[in-house]
Amino acid sequence: MSTFTGSLKKPLAAEVSFDASMLRVRLTDGRELAVPLEWFPKLRDATKKQRENYSFIGNGIGIHWEDLDEDISVKALF
C-alpha cells in the first residue's frame, strides 16, 4: 500500500538559494532539493551577485545563469 499523496507532474523550480556549500532549489510541489556546490564548479566559484543572477528555463524545468553560461535542469538534481 502506497502513502504517496503528491502530484505526478513534472517537478518545476520555483526558487533558488545558496548557503556556504549547497545549492537549494524549491520546487512548485513544495519539495526542496539541496545539492553540493562541488557538483557545479562554476557556481561554487561564482560571486554572490553572479549566483543570484539566474532565470528559469521553460517555466522552471531548468535554471540558467547568464553571467556564468551555466544551465542546470531540475531532472539533473534528482
Image (cartoon, grey):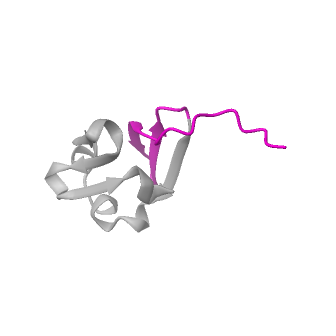
What residue appears at the point 26 percent right and 56 percent down from the top-left corner? 71
What residue appears at the point 22 percent right and 50 percent down from the top-left corner? 65
> Can residue 21 be seen by looking at this rendering?
no
Rendered location of residue 54, percent (x, y) = 24, 43
The residue lying furthest to the right in this view is 1
> Can residue 22 be seen by looking at this rendering?
yes
Rendered location of residue 8, percent (x, y) = 56, 39
Rendered location of residue 25, percent (x, y) = 44, 43
Name the side, left or right, on which 4 lies relative to 71. Answer: right
Q: Is residue 17 shown in magenta?
A: yes
Decide: is 9 above or below 48: above
Name the side, left or right, on which 3 lies relative to 57. Answer: right
Name the side, left or right, on which 57 lies relative to 75. Answer: left
Can you say which quadrant of the picture contains the N terminus?
top right
Rendered location of residue 22, percent (x, y) = 47, 54
What residue appears at the point 32 percent right and 67 percent down from the top-left corner? 41
Q: Nearer the viewer, residue 59 or 38?
A: 59
Q: Main secondary structure of the magenta part?
A: loop
Decide: is 33 above or below 26: below
The quarter of the picture where residue 49 lies is top left
Q: Nearer the viewer, residue 59 or 71?
A: 59
Q: Nearer the viewer, residue 68 or 58?
A: 58
Q: Which stretch did the figure color magenta?
A: 1-30
